[in-house]
Amino acid sequence: MPDAAPHPVRVLAMMNQKGGVGKTTTTVNLAAAIAEQGRRVLIVDLDPQAHASLHVGVEDDDLPTVYDLLHEPEMGVRECIREISPNLHIVPAETDLAAVETELAGQPNRNARLAKALSDETLGYEFVLLDCPPALGLLTLNALSAAQEVLIPMQAHFLALQGVSKLLETVGLVRDQLNPILRVAGIVLCMHDAQTSHSKEVVADLERFFESQRSTKTAWSSARVYRPPIRRNIKLAECPSFGQSIFDYAPWAPGAVDYRKLAETIVAEWDRALAAAKASDLSEAEIRVLRGSLSSKPHARVE
Ligand SMILES: Nc1ncnc2c1ncn2[C@@H]1O[C@H](COP(=O)(O)OP(=O)(O)OP(=O)(O)O)[C@@H](O)[C@H]1O
Ligand SMILES: [Mg+2]
């Protein structure tokens, strides 16, 4: 859960340097599920493959994209947004985005361009989901600089575990050098087969590891393995070719059920975090009042 008194927009980066693990599927369908709950959601497609853009049916339309947003410091984010449904919007990508890595090399603040663009508090989104490419370059660094939290989509395979420790290390470095509030929210298990003993062992390993980190000061000290895991479901693989989320394509398929439940968890933990932040503000105010009244009495002691 986010720390107390965060910015009221929850910005989540779907990150895993490994390809084909479910980053884009999770970005699009989690975003659509959150939007279904009446929350305003923005997707930012940071992958030159533009898979998230295609998944929601946005094709080349000659309007500004995330390429322009990163390239032109003066470009407003609103000009780059397309509406998918009333609560769901996207800043799409285009293949030119691959060039941004070299074009911005040596430019000041090149890793913070997206963070600056999204800092406009009047945009009115409650959730922003960033779809990262499968590489740790300028695009992913922009995502990690703009996000408060990282969600790691992965498959429960032994080799993927080793990738996770490298990934956590990277998030730690980015937190130290670029974004001090960045933390790992947790892991979303994708294409999951709960029946195999191998996947059960991997999930148990992950949970043991995160439990052992609770008292550390790492970026992943409060990370969790999200429930439910997203089952392998062919409907999830089919819907991108129709430019639809699973909720438009097959709203009661297992993939839709799983992403809907995951969205409920993500929204509920954010609501709880905001309520806690509000409550702690109030009690701080009460403490201040109490201290004020005590210190006005000459011999009162404040413990
Ligand atoms: N739960 C699932 N069940 C079945 N197929 C899935 C599921 N999740 C993802 N897929 C399919 O697996 C493939 C890879 O998924 P996806 O594109 O989301 O991964 P990615 O991590 O974004 O890949 P890349 O690293 O290339 O960006 C896609 O064809 C997608 O449709
Ligand atoms: Mg992808």
Image (spheres, rainbow, N blue to C red):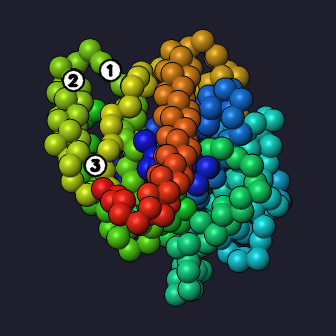
**Rendered image quadrant of residue 178:** bottom left
Return the disc, 3 or 1, that comes first in the chain's sequence: 1
Query: Is label 2's Cβ within 8 Å of ligand 1?
Result: no
Q: Are marks 3 and 1 in contact (CB under 8 Å)?
A: no
Does dot 2 land on a helix, a strand or a loop?
helix
Q: Any mark on residue 221, and which?
A: 3
Q: Which residue is mark 1?
A: 193
Q: Residues within 10 Å of mark 2 (few under 14, many from 20)?
A: some
Q: Nearer the viewer, mark 3 or mark 1?
A: 3
**Rendered image quadrant of residue 206:** top left
Does dot 1 land on a helix, a strand or a loop?
loop
Return the disc, 1 or 2, that comes first in the chain's sequence: 1
Return the disc, 3 or 2, that comes first in the chain's sequence: 2
Residue type marked 3: Ser
Residue 201 percent location from the top left of the image? 17, 27
User: Does residue 241 show up?
Assistant: no
Q: Which residue is mark 2?
A: 200
User: Does residue 9 show up?
Assistant: yes
Side of 28 relative to 215 (left or right): right
Residue plotted at (58% across, 54% down): 7
Residue plotted at (32% across, 20% down): 193
Of residues 216 and 252, the one drawn nearer to the viewer in this rendering = 216
Vertical placement of residue 188 versus 63, above or below = above
Q: Residues within 10 Å of mark 1 (few under 14, many from 20)?
A: some
Residue type marked 2: Lys
Residue plotted at (49% across, 46% down): 283
Q: Quadrant of the C terminus?
A: bottom left
Residue type marked 1: Asp
Q: Residues within 10 Å of mark 3 (few under 14, many from 20)?
A: some
**Rendered image quadrant of residue 263:** top right
Q: Nearer the viewer, mark 1 or mark 2?
A: 2
